[in-house]
Image: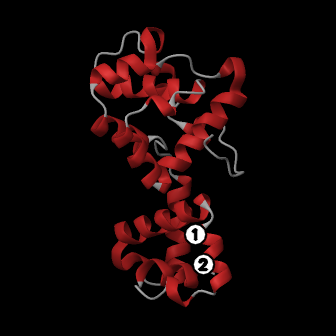
Amino acid sequence: MYGVILAVVTTASGFGQLTVDVKEAIQGSAEAQVALEFSRSIVASEGDGCSTWSKLKAALAYALATPVDALAALVAILEDKEKVKQLEELAGKTRIKGATVKEDKVYGALLAIATTESGFDKLPKAAKDAITASPAATHALAQLCASVSTAGAKAPKTWAELKEVGGPRRLDFGTEPVEVS
């Protein structure tokens, strides 16, 4: 299996050699697309260190065990596509109380998106398009929304609380696929 993944992420023809059913399943699954992008990024960062299926397996295991900010893709998109005033309006005063830099206000905006039904819709088209074009950002947003919803009273209430928990890995993100509604 890891050999197939390695072929798909390292060769131009790898994906084309998959069966039609497998290609359609991958194309229809945000999680599968995120997994392939994650594998591509690991292979790119490891270079020759991922030249065999066993090396890819080890690199993926290491990367998955290493804590990272799962919200990084979303934070980067909103920092790039949003103005500070837009972030402040989206987040509201309570969620960004004490925020002094743009990145902190992004966390407040993410919290607003995750806790209000219209949060995502309030983003400018450029930000929505960038998020939906990124499987990693789409998946992280869906996971954030689901995790905040299920956390109930324990959910972060301010930008600082969301940033402090280190993103979705500490918000008890489930392993089941979720959709952004």
- In the figure, is residue 105 to the left or right of 163? left
Based on the displayed image, in which of its 4 quarters is residue 159 positioned?
Answer: top left
Q: Is residue 119 left or right of residue 85?
A: right
Residue 171 appears in the rendering: no
Is 112 left, or right, of 181 in this rendering?
A: left
Residue at 63% x, 84% y: name it.
20
Picture layout, residue 140 above or below residue 58: above
What's the distance in space between the residues labelled 2 and 1, CA to CA?
Answer: 6 Å
Q: Residue 122 location, x and y as percent?
A: 45, 28
> Does the CB distance between marks 2 and 1 fall below 8 Å?
yes
Check disc 2 and report its element: helix, strand or loop.
Answer: helix
Query: How many numbered discs, if any?
Result: 2
Which amino acid lies under the numbered mark 2 shown in the image of this protein? Answer: Lys
Q: Which residue is mark 2?
A: 23
The image's colouring method is: secondary structure
Q: Residue at x 60, y 42 (%)?
A: 180
Q: Amino acid at mark 1?
A: Gln
Residue at screen point 70% across, 17% down? 153
What residue sits 38% from the left and 48% below the top? 130
Dot 1 corresponds to which residue?
A: 27
Crowdedness of circle 1 by 10 Å Cα count: few (<14), some, many (20+)? Answer: few
Q: Quadrant of residue 72?
A: top left
Q: Position of residue 83 (x, y in %)?
A: 27, 27
Quadrant of the frame with the N terminus: bottom right
Instruction: Give SS at disc 1.
Output: helix
Residue 37 at what x, y percent from top left? 47, 64
Q: Where the C terminus falls, by quadrant? A: top right
